[in-house]
Amino acid sequence: MRCFCTFENRKSAFVAVKLLALSLERHCRDFTLFLGMTETDVELSEWLAKNAPHVVLVHLDPFAQGSSLKHVKPLLILTLLNRGVTDVTWLDTDLLVLRDLEPLLAKLHDDTVLVAQEERSRGFEVNPTLQAHYGLKPLRSLRYHVNSCVIRVSAQHRPLMEKFLECLLDPLFVEQQSKPPAEKLPAFAFEQEVLQMLLSSGDTRWIPAFPVQFMRKGTEIIQELGVTTYKLRNRLRNGLGLRRPWMVHIPGSKPWSPDARARRRRAASVYSAFAETYKDQIQEDMSWVNSAGLSSRIARWLSFGQPHWVGWGHCLAGIAWRLLRTGRLQRTE
């Protein structure tokens, strides 16, 4: 049996929990999704019991000392390892599973950490400020930057998760999480930067010895940070079935956000196109999916019914605008 885990306390994001659970129910077979919560929501619990029988709620103690969601990934994983789970995969709630994950996970060795590739084009590097604070030095380079929306570990990785949790509960890291985004030190803004540091840096007490496998962006996992980040060539290949991504991830602004500006940014969302297939099961308002708004209706019409092709026109327009701006800047220099 495959074990997955996630966490969510924000009522506004419960729709994402439902969608993740339904996508696992549709595509995977023998599995359990452990949903961590510090406060049980009766309405969500009842919905899960009726619609997602493979979800098991896990109570976590309320966060203390100003800590936040940032540290919950290693905390929940360690909780499950302490319960006897030997292999577990963390999934962010803003993910949708697109096909059975068994072929992906079955081929992993017990000592291999699986993570997703971050949406960055520049070469690999670890923030030196972060390394200096934790007293670590670079010992190896990773192939890509790490996105922690997916973290697969086994019981062998308990030391990694313990070190990960220790770093995220560091007083400076905790202090930074309580500040507005504009006031945070960039090096301490994201927990995936800390995980990336631990997988590539070390000292006399910590050695990054575990092999790391990446889910490639665009072909294995869609990182839909914006319409231009899901590249046209990958949209075409995936839509034709030449590639079959495992998941779609929507970092940044969420299409279900109550903020109108955030919804407009996601008007041509591939995530939303896949999410719409679960609309009848969600049992709550999903007007944010691609059927709403002129821009998303145009994107839908241009997709010819293929979710991967939703937003290709927006993507092309975004690329053209970026090239135009780059040309203008060069002419003014």
Image: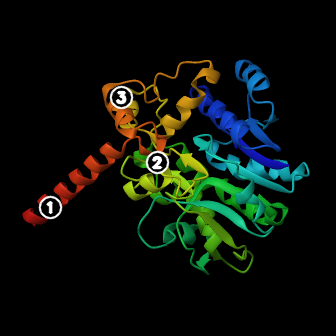
- In the image, residue 91 sits, relative to residue 220, either above or below, namely above
State the residue at coordinates (75%, 54%).
102
Left or right of 254 in this view: 133: right
Q: Quadrant of residue 299?
A: top left
- Packing grade of label 2 (10 A; few <14, some 14-19, many >=20) is many
The circle drawn on residue 176 is: none
Q: Quadrant of residue 152?
A: bottom right
What amino acid is found at the position of numbered circle 1 in the picture? Gly
What amino acid is found at the position of numbered circle 3 in the picture? Arg
Numbered disc 3: secondary structure: helix
- Residue 124: image location, x then y, percent: 49, 72
Mark found first going from the N terminus, 2 or 1: 2
How far apart in space, not on screen, are marks 1 and 3 (Cα)? 31 Å
- In the image, residue 315 sits, relative to residue 121, either above or below, namely above
Q: Where, quadrant-wise, is the C terminus in this rendering?
A: bottom left
- Packing grade of label 3 (10 A; few <14, some 14-19, many >=20) is some
How far apart in space, not on screen, are marks 3 and 2 (Cα)? 19 Å
State the residue at coordinates (37%, 54%).
232
Mark found first going from the N terminus, 1 or 3: 3
How far apart in space, not on screen, are marks 2 and 1 (Cα)? 26 Å
- In the image, residue 302 sits, relative to residue 48, either above or below, namely below
Left or right of 213 in this view: 216: left
Numbered disc 2: secondary structure: loop
Disc 2 marks which residue?
Answer: 224
State the residue at coordinates (42%, 25%).
291
- Residue 279: image location, x then y, percent: 57, 24
Disc 1 marks which residue?
Answer: 327
Mark found first going from the N terminus, 3 or 2: 2
Q: Is residue 185 visible?
A: yes
Disc 3 marks which residue?
Answer: 297
What amino acid is found at the position of numbered circle 2 in the picture? Glu
